Image (spheres, rainbow, N blue to C red):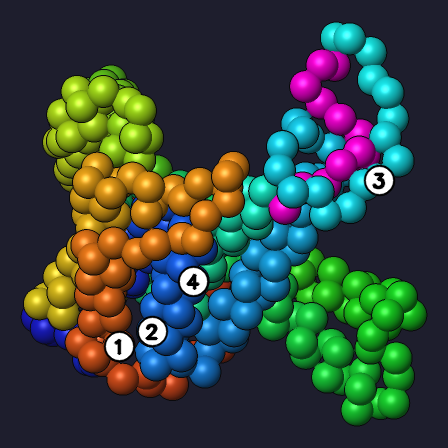
Amino acid sequence: MRARPAAQPGALHPGAWWLWATGLAAAASRTTNPLLLSLVLVVAGYVVACRRTSAPWARAYGFYLRMGVAVIAIRIVFAVLVGAPVPGHVVVTLPEVQLPEWAAGVRLGGEVTREGLAGAVYAGLQLATMLACVGAANALANPRRMLRAVPGALYEVGVAVVVALSFSPQLVEGVSRVRAARRLRGRAHRGVRGLRGVAMPVLEGALERSIDLAAAMDARGFGRGATGTNTSRGQLGRHASGALTLAGLLGVCAGLYGLLDAGSPVALGLPPLAAGAALATVGLTLGGRRATRSRYRPDSWGAREWWVAASGFAAAGAALVGAATTPMSMHPSTSPLVVPGLALAPVLGLLAALLPARVAPAPEADGPGDLPTALTECVVRPPAGVAA
């Protein structure tokens, strides 16, 4: 019997990058301090700069940063034009539209205060930082290997999730390629004229990739059931594993909400999170036994993956400690407006999140990253009687 090929040497498990980025996003969700949020951006950007490859999806981080800037700008515009009036030092006075009594507390125009602008910037920066954390995970985690790491019970869902997560990198790659081609031909690639010339080739390329992906999935038996999966016992096992997984995911969501929301009771945090994780594990294990998917070069989880994931959890845990011990430093007041301060615990936790820049392996050259190619790494065994 031929031995199974070993995992790709020197490559970090993509799940470790997502856990690390989730920890940074959780830390950002616990604070509106612009200094801490800026530190999260610096940490994420430094790790991405040190450990991203030359693959197309690695350029997604800049796209998410630009999206974050747009979020901040939109938040400021809404705070200036629409929103509850915030007392304080008036920066500018705009023409105000008188609203009826049922719209009390909402204004259109009027006085724009420094305190209101600061609150809008803080809230927009928080959301932009969380988007940047997601972009960091997209830039560092190989979507092909992420598809391989999906449990067998969630393979169909995993393909949809990976396709959705790779949308932004594929879009960035397509736009960059078309703009470069138009620039070499001396045609407009900026402004309204450039947008019209770029949109159609990008759309055509997306349709071609979707057709190639559908053909690759059909050729590899995706969605076909193996012999015996339609029996009553198989149906019962499928329903049981699905119910356990759904209940577990609901428990995980409730637990994460309890941990991230400072006003939630303690019983809504760790207990449902632990119970949900246990139920989801049992459901995925039962569902994985019925999976007909083979794995080629399965990714291993070693010490480096634990260190990377732990550094993200350290950032999230330090933010929770800071929110409990020094809430004023995590959420500085904007009315009255004060100079934000820094607490030691969150800063140390975020500095610990720099560990992947040293622990993670050096970037290697990746393939083109097209999902039809990725499906060659995740083969579904066709049912009996169907040629492989």
Amino acid marked by disc 3: Leu
2 and 1 marks in contact (CB < 8 Å): yes
Question: From the viewer's perspective, is the residue at label 3 or at label 1 nearer?
Answer: 3
Specify which label sits upstream in the sequence, 2 or 1.
2
Specify which label sits upstream in the sequence, 4 or 1.
4
Specify which label sits upstream in the sequence, 2 or 3.
2
Task: Look at the image and tell me whether residue 270 can be seen.
Answer: yes
Question: Tag 2, which secondary structure?
Answer: helix
Residue under the point 78% across and 8% down: 101
Question: From the viewer's perspective, is the residue at label 2 or at label 4 nearer?
Answer: 4
Q: Position of residue 348 (x, y in %)?
A: 20, 62
Q: Position of residue 249 (x, y in %)?
A: 28, 30
In the foreground, 166 or 268: 268
Name the outermost residue toward the front: 89
Pointer 3 local density, CA inside 10 Å: few below 14, some 14–19, many at least 20? few
Q: Residue under circle 4? A: 38
Q: In the image, 221: left or right of 83? A: left
Q: Residue under circle 3? A: 94
Pointer 2 local density, CA inside 10 Å: few below 14, some 14–19, many at least 20? some
Residue 326 picture quarter = top left
CA distance separating discs 3 and 1? 48 Å
CA distance separating discs 4 and 1? 18 Å
Residue 104 within the magenta-colored segment of the rendering: yes
Q: Position of residue 353 (x, y in %)?
A: 24, 64
In the foreground, 380 or 327: 327
